[in-house]
Image (tube, helix red, strand yellow):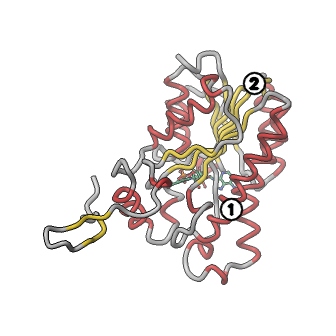
């Protein structure tokens, strides 16, 4: 039981397909006590069975990260119900639809500001507000994607946000290292979730990733969950400021594998039907 005796808050569960749910389950299975948040009343009802499933008890709190007062209230609730916590999972991103397809240069300042506020600044704000309730060897985890490093079709505005999020992870890691707090990111391969449904041509991304990654398959929320649990546990006590890829190895590929037919014709080794 790697997480026995650990308590933490997980932000970003929309349903049982959410990456945050995979992380929550892995932590719980390894003995952690988890608290979760919901965006608004509508999601409170939807998430109540999940909170029950994860045995959150009273520790099921509202938090829309675009509202600073809700982040402050979250700290008060955690202090009252849980005392100190050992980990935070920030599994939150949002970009207006216009930022996830079409011409990149058409993105409005308004859409840009919203995406950066919810997907990037919220990590800084959450860590700052919750710092008084963090134990002195706490671990913070956020979620990124390869589109923050290299061009990915339609990822557009979210790509810029993920680039900023990955650097935010590193600057926070340096800043909080002196307090014993670690900050890491997982760059997950594409997974069919609610947030992913907003990205243009997402089903092709899934196919491409599976076909061209060394493991020839897409990752699951259980795989990301287990890697996340490791980064939140003391097993990774020497690791901070990292962006850890959980993507079937896709990010190491400089070029797709090539096949040569008996006639000597060279083609991309992809039958379009990955496992
Ligand atoms: P998801 O299940 O839709 O989770 C996204 C979460 O962000 C939802 O719980 C959503 O809440 C929450 N959120 C959005 N705006 C918020 C706000 N203002 N305040 C609080 N919460 C807010 O999708 P997911 O794929 O698991 O996404 C989790 C993280 O993984 C994101 O950072 C995403 O970019 C990242 N990621 C995803 C993939 C992928 O392929 N799925 C790959 C790499 C990284 P509501 O649903 O209640 O609005």
Callout 2 environment at 10 Å: few (<14), some (14 to 19), or many (20+)?
Answer: some
Is 115 on the left-hand or right-hand side of 28? right
Q: On the image, which quarter does residue 132 sit in?
A: top right
Of the two numbered discs 2 and 1 on the same chain, state the one appearing first in sequence.
Answer: 2
Reply above or below: 18 against 28: below
Q: Which residue lies furthest to the left in this view?
A: 262
Is 246 on the left-hand or right-hand side of 81? left
Q: Where is residue 16 in the image (x, y as percent from the top left)?
A: 47, 43
Q: Mark 2 points at which residue?
A: 137
Q: Residue at x 67, y 65 (%)?
A: 160
Is 129 on the left-hand or right-hand side of 217? right
CA separation in Å, label 2 and label 1: 28 Å
Q: Which residue is drawn at 63% across and 30% down?
A: 232
Q: Name the residue under label 1.
A: 161
Q: Which residue is drawn at 45% across and 57% down?
A: 253
Q: Which residue is drawn at 72% across and 58% down?
A: 164
Is 63 on the left-hand or right-hand side of 30? right
Reply above or below: 79 against 252: above
Q: How many labels does the image show?
A: 2
Q: Where is residue 7 in the image (x, y as percent from the top left)?
A: 66, 24
> Helix or strand or loop: what does disc 1 sit on?
helix
Task: Determine if the C-beta at disc 1 is less than 8 A from ligand 1.
Answer: no
Out of 43 and 4, give the one closest to the viewer.
4
Task: Determine if the C-beta at disc 2 is less than 8 A from ligand 1.
Answer: no
């Amino acid at each position: 039981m790697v997480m026995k005796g650990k308590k933490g808050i997980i932000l970003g569960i929309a349903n049982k397909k959410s990456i945050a749910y995979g992380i929550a389950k892995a932590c719980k299975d390894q003995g952690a006590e988890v608290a979760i948040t919901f965006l608004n009343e509508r999601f409170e009802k939807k998430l109540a069975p999940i909170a029950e499933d994860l045995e959150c008890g009273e520790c099921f709190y509202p938090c829309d990260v675009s509202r600073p007062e809700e982040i402050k209230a979250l700290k008060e609730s955690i202090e009252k119900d849980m005392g100190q916590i050992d980990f935070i999972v920030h599994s939150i991103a949002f970009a207006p639809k216009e930022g996830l397809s079409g011409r990149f240069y058409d993105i409005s300042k308004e859409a840009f500001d919203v995406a950066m506020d919810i997907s990037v600044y919220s990590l800084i704000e959450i860590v700052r507000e919750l710092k008084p309730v963090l134990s002195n060897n706490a671990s913070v985890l956020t979620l990124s994607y390869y589109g923050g490093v290299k061009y990915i079709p339609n990822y557009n505005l979210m790509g810029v946000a993920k680039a900023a999020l990955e650097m935010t992870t590193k600057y926070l890691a340096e800043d909080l290292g002196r307090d014993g707090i670690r900050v890491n990111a997982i760059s997950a391969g594409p997974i069919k979730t609610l947030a992913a449904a907003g990205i243009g041509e997402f089903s092709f991304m899934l196919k491409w990733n599976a076909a061209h990654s060394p493991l020839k398959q897409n990752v699951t929320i259980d795989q990301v969950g287990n890697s996340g649990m490791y980064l939140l546990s003391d097993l990774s006590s020497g690791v901070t400021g990292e962006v850890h890829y959980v993507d079937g190895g896709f990010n190491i590929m400089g070029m797709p594998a090539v096949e040569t037919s008996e006639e000597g014709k060279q083609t991309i080794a992809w039958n379009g039907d990955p496992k």
